[in-house]
Image (cartoon, helix red, strand yellow):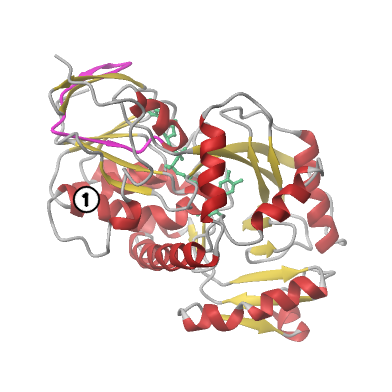
Amino acid sequence: MRHDPDVLVIGGGIVGLFCAYFLRRAGSSVTVVERGPVGGPQSCSHGNTGFVGTQGAAPLAEPGVPAQGIRWLLNPESPFHIKPRWDGGLPRWLWHFRRACNERDAEAAFHVLLDLKKRSLEILREVCADDGLASTFTAQGMVLAFKTPEGFDKGCRSVPRAVDNGVPLRVLDPQELRALEPDAEFDISGALYNEEGAYLRVPDFLREFARTLQGMGVEIHGQTEVLGFEVTGREVGLVRTARGDLRPREVVVAAGTWSAERVRELGLGLMLQPAKGYTVTVKTPRNAPRRPVLLSEGKVAIAPLGDRLRLGGTLELSGMDRTVSRRRVEGILRTVQAYLPEMEHTETLETWSGLRPCTPDSLPYIGRAEPYRNLSVACGHGHIGLGLAPAGGRLIAQILAGERPDMDPEPFRVGRYGGWARPFRRRR
Ligand SMILES: Cc1cc2nc3c(=O)[nH]c(=O)nc-3n(C[C@H](O)[C@H](O)[C@H](O)COP(=O)(O)OP(=O)(O)OC[C@H]3O[C@@H](n4cnc5c(N)ncnc54)[C@H](O)[C@@H]3O)c2cc1C
């Protein structure tokens, strides 16, 4: 590594890359270190379904979720699972999650997440106007499909709230659905449409965006794990990596779900659980949908990637384990078959699992990690991290520059769950 940067970003997933982008644009010299290859399968940003539109800003914690979750726990193919295991952090996380499952908190989180998503979509439109990135971003609307009449009724009842909040959601009649998706044969009760549906093709976007950043002067080092820190007073003085030590002026921890273990040695406790999800990428069948589709009751997303089609879902609280569960993957495929029974079976090209970095309130941690003077955290973007990372990265850059942020940073405060793994210890 060439020199000590103004800012060292730990983690080369979507969040780390967008922090680097805005920090560099603000004039700092920036280095990103990533444990694996940038855009590699270890990263949660690698193989997900990439939805980045204005749809899906609801937090995971909503009224009714605990009861539904318990019903799902009894079904081995359901989209939700908790693996029984010894993890002191899990009961605490679940307790805070349960507390957040009320109207008031869910509504507040929805507004904050929607605002972050809208700002991020604007940034993505700008960034992806660049030639190299244009082919990795598609904004052609999305369909929300409902299998059951009750599900469709519930979906229709959500339309006025969405519209009141500036989300262009509307009911599709069957002819309109046929016109939008002439190849796909849906077996559903009804559908909604959001013309602001958009998605990123990952991992292509990550690799191309990393090249853009390098062109701007950001140093990016793959295969460079951060191993530890040396602290002097209230400053992180030195960062030890697998490829040498660095003495940056500022450190941003954007290591996804690994951020919690990374900052634990600094005495910081982040309320973060890895929530495993799966995607199956197949050769695109002849009669596949042309735009992104959410199979609403089954919680499965479909992303068309040209000659590939990606099917993703499931949320499993099973620790840092990335093993693929056949039963859950079969559950995803069965859900797709129920909504699109005529869709051909084609060759599977990739089965992937990723760990979403989830906070109990679904709001990311973005901000300074007090009492350290030069440590910040950007993680916990959960189930919609691609849709939140751009505006979150801009917020980090504004905070580090000491500027007045363009949005209120309070909901993302790093210390909002207490913040300490153990009492702050002065070292050296
Ligand atoms: C099945 C599935 C579907 C999803 N679909 C969507 C979707 O449609 N839309 C959406 O917005 N979001 C979606 N998500 C969520 C989204 O993928 C995540 O929120 C997002 O990728 C998190 O990004 P991140 O940069 O925080 O974490 P990551 O992408 O995991 O990046 C963190 C990086 O830090 C690195 N790292 C860790 N420790 C160290 C260390 N010590 N030193 C150096 N590097 C380190 C890791 O290797 C990793 O690459 C989905 C997730 C899954 C699993």
**Residue drawn at the location 21% of the way across and 50% of the way down:** 397
x and y, in percent, of residue 150 in the image: 79, 73
Q: Image check: 418 left or right of 40? A: left
Q: Is residue 210 visible?
A: no
- Indicate yes or no: mark 1 CB to ligand 1 under 8 Å: no
Q: Image check: 94 left or right of 121? A: right
Q: Which residue is mark 1?
A: 397
Is residue 244 in the magenta section?
yes
Q: Is residue 157 visible?
A: yes
Front-most of residues 389 and 21:
389
**Residue drawn at the location 72% of the way across and 69% of the way down:** 145
User: What is the quadrant of residue 411 in the picture?
Assistant: bottom left
**Residue drawn at the location 54% of the way across and 43% of the way down:** 95
x and y, in percent, of residue 204 in the image: 48, 46
Bounds of the magenta segment: 240-255
Is residue 357 in the magenta section?
no
Q: Amino acid at mark 1?
A: Ala
x and y, in percent, of residue 147 in the image: 80, 68
